[in-house]
Image: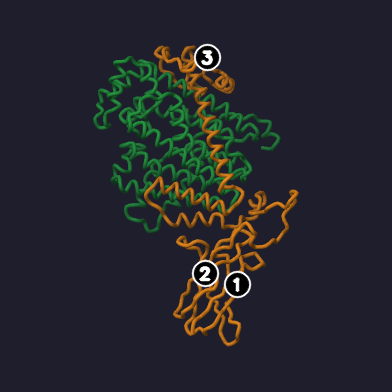
Chain colours: A orange, B green
Amino acid sequence: MTIPKGKAGKAKVHRSRPEPERVGPDRASRAAAPGAAPIAATGYPAGAGEDPSVSESVAHVVKVGYDVIAENIRQGREAAQRFRQGQYRVREVPGDLEVAAVRLLQLARELSTTTFDICERLLRDVGAKVPPEDRASGVPHFRAAKAAGGGPAKAAASPAPAEHPPMKVTVRFRGAARARAYNSGLARPKNPTAAADISAQPLARRTAGAKPITGVVFETDVSVEGIVAVVTVPDGQEPGVYSGLVHAKREDVPLGVLTIEIAK
Amino acid sequence: MTAAAALARPTAAAPPDAMAATMATYGRATRLELERYLGSQTPAPYLDELLADYPSRGGKMLRPAICIANARAFGGSLEAAVRCAAAIEILHNGLLIHDDIQDGSELRRGRPTLHALHGTPLAINAGDAMMFTALRPLIDALRPLGGEVAAQVLDVSLTMARETAEGQALELGWRDSNVTALNEADYLRMALKKTAWMGMIWPAQLGLVLGSGGRGDPESVVRFGYFLGVAFQIEDDLRNLSVDPGYGKEMNGDLYEAKRTLMLIHVRQACADEERVRLDAFLGQPREERSADDVLWLAELMTRLGSIDHARAVAAAMAGAASHEFSLAYGGLAASEDLDFIAGLVPWIFARP
């Protein structure tokens, strides 16, 4: 075998194999290796391949090199297959993206002693963003499930497909009044949506005579699952049950109704 | 260049000056992002100064350049890839901090290592912070590309993290447990995991995924990156034994650390029994007890028994295999300067400063 010095030598490296019956490298002849090899004009070291016995041993290492990478790829494929048959399916984003992100964080924790909660939050947000038009045009939409027979899925299906459970909601109150929430969940947005892009209409009381509650914002909190609705109750708010529709940005079908009660 | 002309033009490995120019261009763009992500208007004491240290020492920016060149070769833009490149460089520098601690290294890029300057606890903390900080530009790079691309990037990144940790564990475990009965396959497996995956395969995969908008197959560049990485690692190990390592590391530092290099594996197999007894005794000593005389003896033994030349020949052969795999992985792409750059990485391994 010759040491490759350009394109002409590439294939030779791969094709040069040791004799089939040999099971180990011939190391006895290596002491006869040539002297120091200067860098040739091609950029490759020159001279190291002039001794046929050395070339044979080097060819063996190249073969071993291919064996190593073939084994590694095989193991990687098996691992990927296990992930994809189990909990990890790449095309089911962002749900599976969250799983992948959690796995990344777990791995990072194993590698390190310090964790930053902000990373967790950022990773959650990865799957919660609507891709812009320029790049999104070539990428399949999230959850664009195909109908039976390969046709496109019906547009504007239910905002909460059966396979996706409701989105958990934690309601937190600000203000002096005693209050409680009736909600523990809302439908998931049809498209990935950041918490800040979810809004509620002013919470109104069914019976007249009370000002609607307008201070409702949605946000994420890494300490709880799902999203957090923060309701600011003004001082002197009339007691009663208040409710308002919740919408995701760019979606007409509401995610549900946020209902709270202000105690007397 | 028209598409037809690009298809007609064969890919040619970029010459050294073109390689340097491309690396400088992509390196500058990446450094701007590094400053943005590592900079702080209100620097945290004992932290931000440390985070900025290694990146300011002027690395080659090889990994970011591989990422950006792949992204552009597969149809993407510099602007879309540069944050991803910054993430790679930040993560790389975080790992270097921890590597230096694990190896007990005293110099990095010609200056004292971070733990030598600030102590091990603060250095570990800075390394942790850099690895997590790397997530920020990565996520910013992915945000406009959609969940499909993000999922692929996380997929290849998780694989890289696992492979790199396994490779580092292998090297440290061999050294700490004084494992001596190693062969070439062991070394290649370690180099694949420890060096090639983080240094070559992952940056190329990220560039491919970004540039192709998630349509390319990240596995297609694994073999090219692997052979490139192994050749790079062997050459790196060889340079460590040279009179002047020239890249800010201690001369013969790998011998002092009893690093399991291809040369060490070869010399242990090729030496006489009495030499092996002395060698094993040397390997079994704590680092601080290894004498300069023994290190010099081992270096001379490697030269005398052809271990250096053997490793040099293997590095060249691995580079040849990398060139072969390049033509398979990138053969279908239109010719471009970025493709020339990627092809030029193979001879550059040996010609790099």
Considering the numbered disc 3 on the image, is that residue within a helix, a strand or a loop? loop
Q: Does A42 appear above or below B140?
A: above
Disc 1 residue crowd, few under 14, some 14–19, many 20+, Cα 10 Å: some
Image position of B37 (left or right of B333): left
Image position of B78 (left or right of B109): right
Q: Are marks 1 and 2 in contact (CB under 8 Å)?
A: no
Q: Which residue is mark 1?
A: A257
Residue type at mark 2: give it.
Ala
- The circle on residue A229 is 2
Q: Quote the CA–CA distance across marks 2 and 3.
A: 71 Å
Residue type at mark 3: give it.
Glu
Q: Quadrant of residue A156?
A: bottom right
Residue at the (43%, 37%) spot, across then down = B166
> Which of the image's four quarters has the N terminus of chain B?
top right
Q: Nearer the viewer, residue B259 or B332?
A: B259
Q: Quote the CA–CA distance across marks 1 and 2.
A: 12 Å
Q: Nearer the viewer, residue A102 or B125?
A: A102
Disc 2 residue crowd, few under 14, some 14–19, many 20+, Cα 10 Å: many
Residue A246, position in %: x, y? 60, 70
